[in-house]
Amino acid sequence: MAKEMKLACNVVEQVEAICDKFGNKPGELINVLHEAQNLHGYLPEEMQRIIARKLGIPASRVYGVVTFYSFFTMTPKGRHPISVCLGTACYVRGSEKLLEEIKRTLNIEVGQTTPDGKFSLDCLRCVGACGLAPVVTIGDRVYGRLQPKDIKTILDEVED
Amino acid sequence: MITITIDRHEVVVPANMTILDAAKVVNVEIPTLCHINLEGTCLKSNPASCRLCVVEVEGNRNLVPACATKCRPGMVVHTSSPRVLRARKTVAELILSDHPNDCLTCPKCSDCELQRLVRRLNCRNIPFKDGERMERKKEITPAITRDMSKCIYCRRCESVCNDVQSVGALGAVGRGFGTIVGTAFGKTLGDTNCTYCGQCVAVCPVGALTERDYAEELIADITNPDKVVIAQTAPAVRYALGEEFGLKPGTSVTGKMVTALKDMGFDYVFDTDFGADMTIMEEGYEILDRLKKFLAGDKTVKLPIMTSCCPAWVNFYEHEFPDLLDYPSSAKSPGQMFGAVAKTYWADKMGIPRDKLVVVSIMPCLAKKYECGRPEFKVDGNPDVDYSISTRELAALIRRSNISFDSLPDSDFDTPMGESTGAAAIFGTTGGVMEAALRTVYEVYTGKTLPHIDLDQVRGLDGVREATIDLDGFPLKVCVVHTLSNARMIMNKLRAGELDYHVVEVMACPGGCIGGAGQPYHHGDGTVLRARQRAAYAEDAGKQLRKSHENPDIQRLYQEFLGEPLHGKAHELLHTSYSDKSIK
């Protein structure tokens, strides 16, 4: 992984403001993490340390919560986050093959981001579009009834 | 009070008592791996996670954990019914399915609570094979070895690190099979705010957390004819070492320990108690110095002065309170004072070059292993104390040297750094350093003999103890705390300007060094600590000299070599400075 960049001053201030908004209460840790991740896209070490200091809890506890919930991530998301649905309907209609194809095409694993920062890859369970199974979302766009051979085309279509 | 039935026994207990504790009243020992409660101290952990203490309660459909189930009137409990035994055995087998079975070569072999349990439950095979096993990299720090492949997730270490010590270096990380009790961001302990207090090691039921072992270095040095190897033994070692050889806790084995060290090949065996008397001279005079300035109206003087003998406590304030580093005494710990004097005064006297002299400290402590490697305590890269071994490591070395400990005759420490007073003898218990310092401070300040030498106000095991000592009309307010959560409470008050003491003693481990992480494992038995504490006070009471400033060898050392306390050579060799080590 690339060496972590230092957070910009305004990001530090914003994260501190989020903690203040929740009264710097240790019990608000998950809410704080939610907002911080919304703000910044991911939760790098430095940000977790700021949160730990503000809430007056050990960094190990913040890190423990971040690593426990799959929602939280310490890797920066790509500009176009890809999610492959592995819910029951999509799964039986072959979404695992789509996932393999995306991994192969982009040469990344689940949870990773391409070196150019364009795509990141995750899995989820059901987007509520089972009629379109198997489903992949890229950013806000939903692609349905896909086959592995479609993957290259839809990835190429995504413009930065 | 309510009456319940446990197996064949009727027992009357308070209503809020757990079944586990109620069973102890009638000597029914329900097994557990995660529960620990060191009575008399605040060391407790009860996550109710191991499920080995399950029992059957009549009328309940499911088995219940004895550690987390309160007694109810008329309750009928079966602790070893066939159903309970079957469930308990399955739980043990499941733990074994994910545990390496290299017991023969494990450092915890024969002291392992899991091993004992498996024997007790008569597990003869491991039915759950080919389970997912997490191989983890072993981490060796200067003080602690972490082998997380052996972790059984009892989370005692996490409780101790967070609740008892308020350090929070360790916590549960990840989820499911990938869960590990680890550090923030997977750093090595040395890159966290870990203080090396080692209390995680003291409570680990298995071999996941152990001390860094220096036995091989020691044997290499002892057998090297070019080296002169000297030992110094800490106050708390002598009344705990015997436990490793089957003696009752609190049995003082000073003479046998000295003989054993000589038989092992140490060239000279000295006493850290001598260093403790030196510490009182320096710390005591520093207390007096600050007091006099304070009474003369000096507003800049930092009070309370805090003791600085405990290396985990030093690490703690360097990490957590870098803005308050002017408050602790600048005096080095007794072990480091001893090392500094041994490698100058004594080495010169004996004509031994510094690089040929090896000083080994035998300590109840794991943080000492780190302390002696601190750069401040080295001269041209050569440390004042070369390395530190724990009470447990010493016992292992004695066994390995084919020494029958129990039948050893007594020997005396070598001179001149073997003579010590009763004040030094109590250094190993919480309150001991304070009492020792006050004996000297009182007499030097008032010029009078102390009327009552036993300062009962500062004795005991309560987490925070306060006392006021009358110094010729001046009420000296003192406070004694042990465990780092109590220390944090004191430091937070100091930061907030709410602290009204002149002197504060802090020891990181529960009970002080008697409960140090290098001591024989107490396995949660609080009576062990109390027995060691009694032994410390008994040794003090039996000494002819009980005040550090009356130690004739100390007086000679100051006359011949050190000069005045706090000044010149004494300052240069016996004092140190602290730096901001907070994690940014």
Image: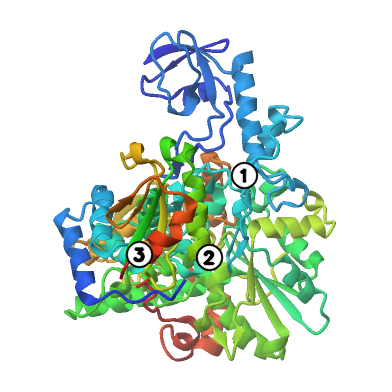
Give the Cα distance between marks 3 and 2. 60 Å
Q: Residue at x 80, y 85 (%)?
A: B226
Q: Nearer the viewer, residue A17 or A72?
A: A72
Give the Cα distance between marks 2 and 1. 23 Å
Q: Nearer the viewer, residue B203 or B350?
A: B203
**Between tags 3 and 1, which lies in front?**
3
Residue B277 coordinates in the image, percent (x, y) = 51, 71
Q: Secondary structure at mark 3?
A: helix
Residue assigned mark 3: A157
Looking at the image, residue A67 lies above or below residue A4: above
Q: Secondary structure at mark 2?
A: helix
Instruction: Locate residue B256 relative to residue B533 in the image: left or right.
Output: right
- Label 3 packing within 10 angstroms: few (<14), some (14-19), many (20+): few
Q: Secondary structure at mark 1?
A: loop
Which labelled disc corresponds to residue B249? 1
Is the same chain shared between marks 2 and 1? Answer: yes
Give the Cα distance between marks 3 and 1. 76 Å
Which quadrant would the N terminus of chain B be assigned to in this image? top left
Q: Quadrant of residue B30?
A: top right
Q: Residue at x 42, y 47 (%)?
A: B461
Q: What's the residue type where badge 1 is placed?
A: Pro
- Label 2 packing within 10 angstroms: few (<14), some (14-19), many (20+): many
Q: Residue at x 67, y 87 (%)?
A: B347
Q: Quadrant of residue B539?
A: bottom right
Instruction: Locate residue A35 relative to residue A114 in the image: left or right.
Output: left
Residue assigned mark 2: B367
Q: Nearer the viewer, residue B340 or B99?
A: B99
- Label 1 packing within 10 angstroms: few (<14), some (14-19), many (20+): many
**Chain for disc number 3:** A
